[in-house]
């Protein structure tokens, strides 16, 4: 199979982890007789530095013309600490999601058994946890009208959803549930927010088309609590853009670390595969970032965009084997990990390649 992949590494550890993701894709191509060609494109702070624009037109054009995108991260402390900055790296990521119509962000929370000890949650509550989040990605307060008034002394962001936006993400969630444990939990704040009341109304309508799926509705505050109290009660979770952003960072602790969580952003156009973590300035350049979120994102690409199930499985198995062999990056190591098994980003990549 011939496929053309655009690598948008972006900022901070985005560069370090996508390098490993790409190496793994290359090894898969070699092993299974595929031809993957690559191009690179700019986004975020590096794009602002080079062009003044966090999302150059060329990046959108290259992305649209590709079969899939391997994305790293955006962000830089310079902007995080300057609320007045008008041009920001994150606009690049929001812009490409919107430009490609990537309205569904799939965030699987899968705990590798070997990492039971890496989580701060007690193992007896964790073992077997397996959740698939559907985070809506092109609506909500992220894209509603925002601004300042009263000569700048008041600021507002509008939480807004339209029926079709809720319906299409709900359908994706229910379809996925049909292939899993047939449970959907929809998360909103319908006791307060009008946009959540529309959300709940539409999810209830969609649910009628899937009588075999057990549906529950939870408010975001309770859902955040239940996720830690009893993660195994969840199968598929569907929620809006902001709630999904927050809940999945929380859920990363079920899998052990932010460095373990992959995602697929899909919709109308080329799929984009991105770790859920950011540019992690605190560890950038130290060579210690966990590349597994990028590697597992590459596995999602193989599966979802290319339909290469066996190849995707080979990647996940390699991750499993490396963990079984005791290798850890710093973020998933615990007090029992021997020092010689704690690897940097590139060494972890080499172990994976050896397994493949
Ligand atoms: P972050 O995800 O970058 O980091 C949070 C914590 O997790 C840090 O302690 C970091 O060291 C750790 N971490 C994250 N990924 C890791 C990995 N692969 N291996 C080991 N440890 C890892 O979130 P933040 O610190 O809130 O944000 C930093 C910057 O990243 C900000 O500018 C923010 O806007 C941006 N950001 C971008 C994305 C994205 O590009 N998708 C996502 C989140 C945040
Ligand atoms: C993510 C990030 C982004 C988001 C930011 C960087 C715009 O946190 O991908 O989860 O909020 O969607
Ligand atoms: Mn996030």
Image: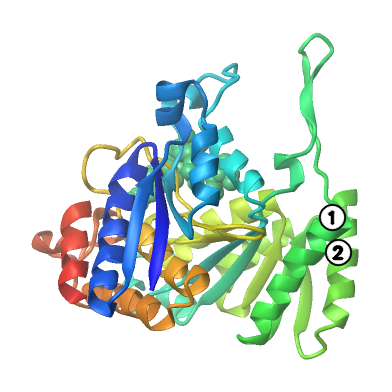
Q: Quadrant of residue 117?
A: bottom left
**Gap between marks 1 and 2 measured at Cα:** 6 Å
Residue at the spot of label 2: 200
With respect to residue 48, does 351 lie above or below?
A: below
User: In the image, is 23 to the left or to the right of 239?
Assistant: left
Q: Residue at x 28, y 79 (%)?
A: 32
Please say which color scheme the image uses: rainbow
Q: Position of residue 130 (x, y in %)?
A: 52, 77
Q: Position of residue 229 (x, y in %)?
A: 58, 69
Q: Is residue 44 above or below residue 207?
A: above
Is the CB atom of the residue marked by disc 2 within 8 angstroms of ligand 2's nearest atom? Answer: no
Q: In this orientation, does residue 319 appear?
A: yes
Which residue does the numbered mark 1 point to in the structure image? 196
Q: Residue 52 versus residue 129: which sits nearer the camera?
A: 52
Q: Is residue 105 left or right of residue 194?
A: left
SS at circle 1: helix
Q: Residue at x 48, y 59 (%)?
A: 68
Q: Residues within 10 Å of mark 2 (few under 14, many from 20)?
A: many
Direction left: furthest residue: 340
Residue 27, horizontal then vertical, whole percent = 24, 68
Mark 1 and mark 2 in contact? Answer it, CB < 8 Å.
Answer: yes
In the picture, the quarter occupied by the C terminus is: bottom left
Q: Residues within 10 Å of mark 1 (few under 14, many from 20)?
A: many
| Front one among 174 and 224 | 174
Residue 269, label in figure: none
Q: Residue at x 78, y 38 (%)?
A: 144
Q: Which one is nearer the viewer's eye here, 182 or 42?
A: 42
Residue 288 percent location from the top left of the image: 23, 48
Q: Which quarter of the figure is the N terminus placed in? A: bottom left
Q: Secondary structure at mark 2?
A: helix
Which residue is pictured at 29% across the width and 70% down the height?
29
**Is residue 344 in view?**
no
């Amino acid at each position: 199979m011939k496929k053309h992949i655009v690598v948008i590494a972006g900022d901070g550890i985005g560069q370090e982890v996508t390098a490993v993701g790409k190496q793994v894709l290359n090894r898969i191509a070699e092993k299974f007789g595929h031809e993957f060609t690559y191009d690179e494109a700019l986004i975020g702070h590096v794009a602002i530095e080079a062009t003044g624009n966090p999302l150059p037109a060329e990046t959108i054009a290259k992305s649209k013309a590709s079969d899939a995108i391997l994305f790293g991260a955006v962000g830089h402390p310079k902007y995080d600490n300057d609320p007045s900055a008008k041009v920001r790296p994150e606009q690049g990521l929001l812009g490409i999601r919107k430009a490609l119509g990537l309205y569904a962000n799939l965030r699987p929370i899968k705990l590798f058994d070997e990492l039971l000890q890496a989580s701060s949650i007690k193992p007896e509550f964790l073992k077997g946890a397996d959740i698939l989040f559907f985070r809506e990605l092109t609506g909500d307060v992220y894209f509603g009208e925002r601004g300042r008034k009263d000569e700048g002394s008041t600021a507002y962001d509008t939480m807004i959803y339209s029926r079709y936006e809720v319906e299409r993400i709900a359908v994706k969630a229910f379809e996925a549930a049909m292939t899993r444990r047939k449970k959907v939990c929809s998360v909103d704040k319908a006791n307060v927010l009008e946009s959540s009341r529309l959300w709940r109304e539409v999810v209830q309508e969609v649910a009628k088309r899937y009588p075999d799926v057990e549906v529950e509705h939870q408010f975001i505050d309770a859902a955040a609590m239940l996720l830690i109290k009893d993660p195994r009660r969840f199968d598929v979770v569907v929620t809006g853009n902001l709630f999904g952003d927050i809940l999945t960072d929380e859920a990363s602790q079920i899998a052990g670390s932010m460095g373990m969580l992959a995602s697929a952003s899909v919709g109308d156009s080329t799929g984009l595969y991105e770790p859920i973590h950011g540019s992690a300035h605190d560890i950038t350049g130290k060579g210690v970032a966990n590349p597994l979120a990028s590697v597992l994102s590459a596995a999602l690409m193989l599966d979802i965009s290319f339909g290469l199930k066996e190849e995707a499985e080979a990647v996940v198995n390699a991750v499993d084997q490396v963990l079984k062999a005791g290798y850890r990056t710093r973020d998933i190591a615990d007090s029992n990990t021997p020092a010689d098994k704690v690897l940097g980003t590139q060494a972890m990549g080499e172990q994976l390649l050896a397994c493949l």
